[in-house]
Image (tube, coloured by chain):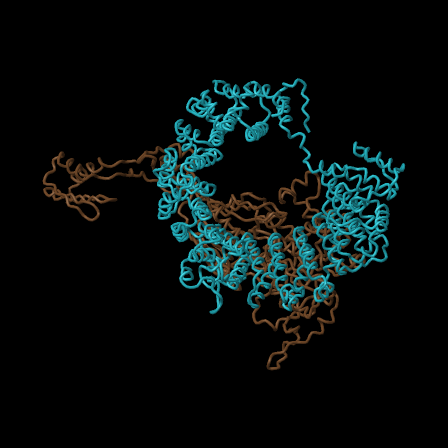
Amino acid sequence: LKLYRKRHPTLPCNVLKFKSTTIMLDCGLDMTSTLNFLPLPLVQSPRLSNLPGWSLKDGNAFLDKELKECSGHVFVDSVPEFCLPETELIDLSTVDVILISNYHCMMALPYITEHTGFMGTVYATEPTVQIGRLLMEELVNFIERVPKAQSASLWKNKDIQRRCYTMQEVNSLVGYSQKIELFGAVQVTPLSSGYALGSSNWIIQSHYEKVSYVSGSSLLTTHPQPMDQASLKNSDVLILTGLTQIPTANPDSMVGEFCSNLALTVRNGGNVLVPCYPSGVIYDLLECLYQYIDSAGLSSIPFYFISPVANSSLEFSQIFAEWLCHNKQTKVYLPEPPFPHAELIQTNKLKHYPSIHGDFSNDFRQPCVVFTGHPSLRFGDVVHFMELWGKSSLNTVIFTEPDFSYLEALAPYQPLAMKCIYCPIDTRLNFIQVSKLLKEVQPLHVVCPEQYTQPPPAQSHRMDLMVDCQPPAMSYRRAEVLALPFKRRYEKIEIMPELADSLVPMEIKPGISLATVSAVLHTKDNKHVLQPPPRPAQPTGGKKRKRASDDIPDCKVLKPLLSGSIPVDQFVQTLEKHGFSDIKVEDTAKGHIVLLQEAETLIQIEEDSTHIICDDDEVLRVRLRDLVLKFLQKF
Amino acid sequence: MDPECARLLPALCAVLADPRQPVADDTCLEKLLDWFKAVTEAGSSLLLLQEHPCLVELLFHVLKPQDLSSRILSFALRLAGIFAAQENCFQFLQQGELLPGLFGEPGPLGAAAWAAPSVRSGWIQGLHSLAQHPSALRFLADSGAVDTIFSLQGDPSLFVASAAGQLLVRVLDLALRGPAEGRVCPQAWDWPACARKVVCHLEDCLRSEATPRVTQALHVLTTTFGHCRGLWTQGLWARLSPLVARLLEKDPVPAPHALVDLLLGVARSPVLSSDPGLWETAAQALSRLSPTQAGPLAAGILKLQDCPQALRIQAFSILLQPLAHVLEATAQAPGTPRLLEGAAGDLMAVDTFPPSRSACVGLLCSALAHLELLQPLPQRPSPWPQAPLLAAVVTILRFCNGSAAPSSEAGGRLCAMLVGCVRVQRAALDFLGVLSQGLGPQELVTQVFAILLEYLVSPDSSPTVLKKAFQATLRWLLSSATPPGCCDLEPYAQLVLGELLAVLQKRLCSPCWEVRDSGLEFLTQMTRHWGGQGSFRQALLGSEVPELTRQLLQDPESYVRASAVAAVGQLSSWGLLTAPSSPEHPAVPQTPLEELLLVLTTDSEGFPRRAVMRVFTEWLRDGYADVAEDPEQSVAPVLRAASRDLDWEVRVQGLELALVFLEQLLGPRGPSTAAPPGALTQALQALCRVQLFEFAFRSLFDCDRPVAQKSCDLLLFLKAKATPSGSQQEVGDGPNVASVEAALRRWQAGEQGQPLGELAPEAVLAVLRSMDLEALRDTLAESSDHVERSPQSLLQDMLATVGVLGDNEADCY
């Protein structure tokens, strides 16, 4: 049972080898590398195009076409590139299945499915696939609609980064608690994880072992179905990833902060920009704003949601009722749309557009609130708004997505006059919740990334910001192979009914019965079945045709199995009764030696064997053997 | 007893004795007992029983074996106790063997009814009332009641158990007060047998290994020393104190809370506090009890006016220890103030904090609360370690928000336990606010403001924590005025002010209404103190705060609107509210006065309207420019709106506003002379123009008593001003007067429809003179149920509910 660790903990990509299957757990794409690139503006930006080239200290300017400098930071002037999953640690064509836990953790999937010879199956829930597809579509659209003349390559010394992929396919949809057999060897089951629409934790189990994979889970009451904790009980190993990236930020407080700053800016006549993904927290933010705007006197302020997939995202959210929390599910029966953003759209308070071009430019009214991507501020419509609004201190950009450092994201826009507010809303488990979860679920072993077993480097005194469990969690690092701390000891074998009928168990101890069985072990698809042995072949009267039973190994008639122990004193008495005299008993380390001096014979009795040593006297040996057998049970 | 009650009593007794007649409820029986108690206290019980044999019959009836309800049985026991409190009546009942029947073995004690807690409770209360005289003491001793009381101390019903303890105290007091009266220190051999028995019982309990028995004994002793001031208590304490001290040697100390209560009770008793042994025991308790248990004892000791200095030092160190531990747990540069020096400081090497989070939090919170209560007391420890306490509280607050850097492993644990703990945050902020009464080194004051700002800025501060942070900030800002008492802010506070206003701006936009509310309250307070101060005005006018405050007048939450009204009132009285920027809409109110009037006339909730009335009253009283310009013009619409308001508090405040208006016209209230006739006429004309009289006269008959009372006060004031003693003015009885009086009569009869119309000042004066306002005031001063509360009414009600009075004509409302 081995675990291969591949990416950072919130965008996990682990490989689990378990019972001859190779399972990839999640396939997250690390997009932080894009922060090193210049933003891709939708409209020609003189500021960005006039940035000075960067030259080495020795004056060598061979990179000045590719690298540009902005406010002391260096950026690559090229199409953004992403860090790929590790490909050297394991041959990805040997991966049997990929299990996806939420739509954020599948963004690297095309790199695996298109470039590595991967032939397996990808399992995910339907909302995960649909919304994941939207995220990918948005990403591809953002990058493809701004064709960049050059693709820089000189600046990097190793090709660890790749350009963005094109569209691809994902297969095999599953529902919560649906059991999926993998080659008969293991069974995998997705469970609700409470983090996002269709997000799941996975149980990977055989008949005698259970591994739980907990990734991106939430115990807060937001829009998705609540987390299923009970099914995680009795795990041998619990792999814990995808905890909150900002453990010190309470999501509720952050939402309050978000609303306060939004209202403050708009009341002063400024605009608010919210860089975000097209799905996820935005649904909750819109719901909060729905409740807040009237009370804060913001009813007349337009809210714009701009994304190539804005429409699909808002509509998808309304149709996945079965994946929603109970409150939202019940609304469907009223019938009402589960999310209140439907009403915001109806009343024209929220408008959505595929991009800033077209209708949006006609409807655009200020002051306003704009939700748009990409949160890295490197591509997407957000780049335009940063350029447009960055110069005025009346405007505010509010960061709610925790995936990117907001200071790094803002670096190419410096100097910036607009206000910046950081309200990361990460609803995934924090360490207090993890402690409670582990106390509840009580796995035998916890395995988690090394980062979770020590306080964050910037707050080394915060002992509360680490996983605290007994026994201590096993940690792993990037690109490390970890042998999971348990051995498989049992395998389940089925017995065919007719064979079972023929067995006659004998009770050798109270509660323990034994029976010998002679059968053929039939193994197919990792399932083992004992079948009745073939009947001994009938003599066929000299026909030399090859018999069918030739393929089946010969079944010898087995000698009965013996059990029990030989009480030496009684054995000696029996020998004496049968006319042996001059018997001597010696104790040895492992048992006893009974010496029949007259017959020059030696009987060595040990715990698991008895030897009769005599000189070529077969009759005597058989007599002694029978006396020994009298003390043992046969079956 | 009045004849009507005497007439009803036999019927009532018959009803009570009849098991088939259900008695209305327990409260009737309680009221009945109260009445009997009042009657017996005013006269002879014996006479009462002789005049009303039905009462004795009722008591005898209870003795018969029958199916009486437990509440009637309990009632009878208590009633018998009330009668037997007088010795001659006791003898009378004793002759009839009534008392042994009720309180002795043959009574309910041995019967099935004893299973009802109310019966056991009635038995105890009966004896408690009865135990007033030597005969009662003999009765208690002979009847074996004392043993029953002992066993009832462990009763499953807490009320019964507690009453049993109190009865023992009563028995002790009765037994020892008499014989030992006047002696300096009575000796045990002088005590009556009954007292000796009780004391031996208490001794046994104190020696017992069973904690509940120890607790019972300690409770009895605490009550004894707390309530009985006789010299005999000295003897009792001298006899029992060694046993109490021995409890402290046990491990663990049994019943620590009860023990602390006892020691404090003894220490507070003027008769006992001179005993030097007491202080030794207290010192021993302080050192033997855990810090959590010893905290209340230490705090109690420090509040005592007179106790040995060494003990005070020891007690104070107990309270300081948790805070000292917090200080030790953080990286401290050498030379920073320590809370505990010398031997007490060395104790800190031991990890005093309990390992569990809740215990640790409880200890810190109680230490902070005790110190908070001590700080303002004149007998607080001196020197008061202001600087280290400030440092410790700041450190605790830093632990709670995760910004403190612990210097040890214990500190790390403390950090993990305190992070995000709202309880500790609240306690620490309260204490920090109280500490603003003392001075501190500038560096620490800077830290105080820094941590307060951190809490105010942090999105993680819960609404309650935020409110406390605002309160503490205000207190520190007030205390940092230079020199003390001056209204100008010191330079550092002025720096803080800028950041404060930025925070306030954001908080006023919070989605949480509690936060918006506390923000507005803070703003109102700040403006009240520094509204006239240059730097404050400049900072405030440079921020968005005034505009946001005005917008909050439309907040969906009524409490917030009320606070916004108060804030707008305060801001505009200092000229800090700029005109709204919508001149294109003439419908939008332009002045704060108009804005508040709009709230008064349109707001659907009472709180904002009440707030508006308070603001108007304040404006008028303080001469706010907009109002002072033309008070009559300003007051008239407000009074009109208030008089029609459905909320009685608004109407009361409307009358208060009218009263202020009157004072400004006619001079202040008090025994001063009448107003000069010229001024009076003018004033009356003004009052008629603002239609004050219609409001005031109507209010006289308002269904809400406070409104009527206020109106009565107002008219009395006016009457006093208008008709100086001895000089009746000549005013004719015109038709106008008659119509007013007719209207008043109609209103009094409950008809509200008729307006008074135009009133002439003369008519008003005539009506005022003709009205007996003093009598009306006296009637209003009586509570509304003064008629229904009479014993006669009680008896009638009780009889009516069971139908004895024929028609069921009880006036229930």
If the image is split into quadrants, where does the C terminus of chain B sit? top right
Frontmost residue, A96 versus A199: A199
Please, is residue B114 above or below residue A374 in the view? above
Instruction: Specify the quadrant of the image occupied by residue B460.
Output: bottom right
In the rendered image, the residue lying farthest to the right is: B735
Q: Is residue A385 visible?
A: no
Q: Is residue A559 visible?
A: yes
Instruction: Specify the quadrant of the image occupied by residue A554.
Output: top left
Q: Pinpoint residue A91: horizontal percent, then vertical percent.
A: 51, 59
Chain in brown in the render: A
**Residue B636 horizontal side relative to residue A129, left or right:** right
If the image is split into quadrants, where does the N terminus of chain B sit? top right
Frontmost residue, A340 versus A61: A340
Frontmost residue, B309 versus B343: B309
Q: Pinpoint residue B667: horizontal percent, then vertical percent.
A: 78, 52
In the rendered image, the residue lying farthest to the bottom is: A58
For chain B, what colour was chosen? cyan
Q: Pinpoint residue B234: horizontal percent, then vertical percent.
A: 40, 44
Please, is residue B25 above or below residue A425 in the view? above
Frontmost residue, A340 versus B542: B542
In the rendered image, the residue lying farthest to the front is: B726
Disc tally is: 0
Q: Pinpoint residue A15: horizontal percent, then vertical percent.
A: 51, 55
Please, is residue A278 above or below residue A499 in the view? below
